[in-house]
Amino acid sequence: MTRRFAPFVERIAHEGGNDPWALHWEARHAAARGEDVIVLSVGDPDLSTPVPVVETAVAKLRAGDTHYTESGGRPALRSAIAAQHRQRTGQAVTADNTVVLSGTQNGLFVASLCLAGPGDEVIAIDPMYTTYPATIRASGATLVRVPATASAAFRPDLAALEAAVTPRTRAVFLATPNNPTGVVLSVAEVDALASIARRHGLWLVSDEVYAGVVDGGSVPSLATRLPEQVLTVGSLSKTHAMTGWRAGWIVGPGDFIRHADALAQCMLYGLPGFIQEAAITALAMAHAAEAEVRDYCRVRRELFFRELRDVPGIRAYWPDAGMFMLLDVRASGLPTADFVRRLYAAEHVSLLDGAAFGRETEGFVRACYAADEAALVEAARRIRRFCVRLAAG
Ligand SMILES: Cc1ncc(COP(=O)(O)O)c(C=O)c1O
């Protein structure tokens, strides 16, 4: 018998056959074994989920909230998501404009499947989060990359974006702040993007998973400018140190939400009730939780940047916001895959190869600075030692 898989599996395969997360998981497993490893390769804040959120989940579990739930989310959680979105953006949305999904990643996947299909094109700004290519191609659409180059401080080239639009283009996927660059789209850029989308009848999928981490707790909103064509995707992962809870959502126009709800029914079948209840608690205390993560990131961004000053062969980029710093390691003379591998082998510091985010970050590596301060100082010391040795040949 010839065993065959659907063409779909090729669309979701890792580009070039390389899993960008392989070294990260190797480092995580070594750390779990108690080895002296510093893991800065993932955006997972080194903070605990707020106690009231954990308490809600435990109480609900004990009370038996362990049964099926509405596939698109409980009404109370959908209302809470709508309330937070209204407060953050000013867009007048209700529970009917929301769907509860398993994290931003699940939201991006749902958006992809509901917006595009074979023969369509979807634009994404390069560099982009590592999951975007497979998420976009999963629908059968072709991914079209529009650059945000290092020489333009990783700001998107919106003229190039409009030039890339064809009659087949259905949507633009972007993240503000961006991961890995930390770039937050400005008011002018958001205005221009909304105009392009309006002119060409495109969907905009705005990944705002880090919006609460930006100074002031919000980003210039695409959704307020073009409510009928914008999906805002988010979660509690970053703002509440809740990456493992998988509590996320999409906010968008009602017709889209009905399709997303139908997809949630045949794909997810509802987030666990105790997690949804914990998410309601989390949203009720979002102001304080976000302020804590924001302050946490602000202090560590400065610390890590300072510690990496004058490291031979490295230039650190100052991010607008988020949890990540890009390090330009081109002057080290090593391809980035070798840089991260050799750094890990020699110094047990795990970073992510910038090539995992697209063509524009080849020559860069990404460090997450949402980590313990002493670990950050030690990581910078080890990176310096590695680079000094490299420079000495
Ligand atoms: C830009 C971006 N989008 C989505 C995700 C996934 O987030 P979630 O945990 O909400 O699925 C991440 C995680 O790092 C991210 O950086």
Image: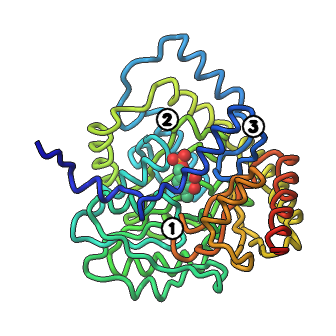
* Quadrant in which residue 138 is drawn: bottom left
* Residue 295: % across, % down: 81, 51
Q: Are discs 1 and 3 less than 8 Å apart at CB? A: no
Q: Nearer the viewer, residue 135 or 3?
A: 3
**Residue type indicated by callout 2:** Leu
For marks 2 and 3, give the one nearer the viewer.
3
Observer able to see residue 182: no
First reached walking from the N terminus: tag 2 or tag 3: 3
Q: Are discs 2 and 3 less than 8 Å apart at CB? A: no
CB of mark 2 near ligand 1 (< 8 Å): no
Q: How many residues crowd mark 3 within 10 Å: few (<14), some (14–19), many (20+)?
A: few
- Pointer 2: what residue? 77
- Pointer 1: what residue? 222
Q: How many residues crowd mark 2 within 10 Å: few (<14), some (14–19), many (20+)?
A: many
At x 86%, y 51%, the residue is 378
At x 53%, y 84%, the residue is 157
* Quadrant in which residue 108 is drawn: bottom left
At x 58%, y 29%, the residue is 278
**Residue type indicated by callout 3:** Glu
- Farthest front residue in view: 393
**Residue type indicated by callout 1:** Leu
* Residue 36: % across, % down: 78, 41
Q: Is residue 303 left or right of residue 316?
A: right
Q: Nearer the viewer, residue 370 or 375?
A: 375
Query: Would you place residue 101 above or below residue 305 in this image?
Result: above
Mark 2 to mark 3 CA distance (whole Å)? 41 Å
